[in-house]
Amino acid sequence: MSFLRKVGAVAWKDLRAEWRTREMFSAMFVFALLIVIIFNFALELRVENARALVPGILWVAFTFSGMLGLSRSFILEKDRGSLEGLLLCPVDRSAIYLGKMLSNMALMGIVEAFVLPITFVLFNLSFRAVPMLVVVVALGTLGFAGVGTLFSAMAVNTRAREVMLPLLLFPVAVPLLIAAVKLTAGVLDGLAMSEVSRWWQLLVGFDVIFLTLSLMTFDYVIEE
């Protein structure tokens, strides 16, 4: 079996398990939707131009709902005693990491695909910005899921694993979130690419550096 097929098998296993219950998707979607709706009604009363705060609202919804999925990435297998069996499979540990990361990305992506148009409708935004915004969201989700999958594997062996994951992840993800929010604002405001080029560099650089580091350290992290 080729390396890519092994990665796909791990990702497909997790997505099929989620499809049977849809527990995490439902929780993530409802949580993200509630964040957007609550901010919409709160800011409608207090801020004249609530649309200026949409980039921050979107990424609060994406990251906090994504945290729910990331926190369960390894917990179910750990609780059921199947994590050891997964690690004993004759595959490279990097394939397990990439498969888990892809399944987390897919779950976050599905939630984002529902939440994004709802946000545009609630805040009366132009849908012309959607194509470029999808690129920003995809790159941001890639970096967040990549680092989050590594820290999820690290936190699963601790007692306070639900608390430990956000404590580990959010400080590291700060540059990613800043770049994603700035680029989202630039896209919605129709700024030229040159005006936000440094944020593109930061976002892509974060993805490349931290995905490489995650691949290199996952074997050690999951063993410990």
Image (cartoon, rainbow, N blue to C red):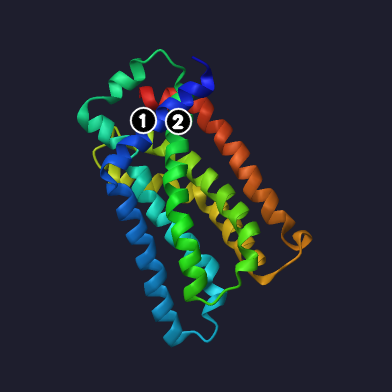
Label total for image: 2
**Amino acid carrying mark 1 in the image:** Lys
Mark 1 or mark 2: which is in front? 1
- Residue at left offset 56%, top offset 54%: 137
Q: Earlier in the sequence, mark 1 or mark 2?
A: 1
Mark carried by residue 192: none
Viewer-nearest residue: 117 or 51: 117
Residue 11 sits in quarter:
top left
Residue designated by label 2: 99
Residue 218: x, y in percent? 46, 27
For mark 2, does the 10 Å Cα neighbourhood hold few (<14), some (14 to 19), or many (20 or more) residues? many
Residue holding disc 1: 13
For label 1, count other residues whose C-alpha is less than 10 Å away and answer few (under 14), some (14-19) or many (20+): some
Q: Amino acid at mark 2?
A: Gly
Q: Nearer the viewer, residue 109 or 204?
A: 109
The percent coordinates of residue 124 (x first, y second) are 54, 77
Residue at point 44% right, 80% down? 43
Where in the figure is residue 126, as x and y percent of width and height?
61, 72
Location of residue 117 in the rendering, given as x and y in whole percent from the top left corner: 50, 65
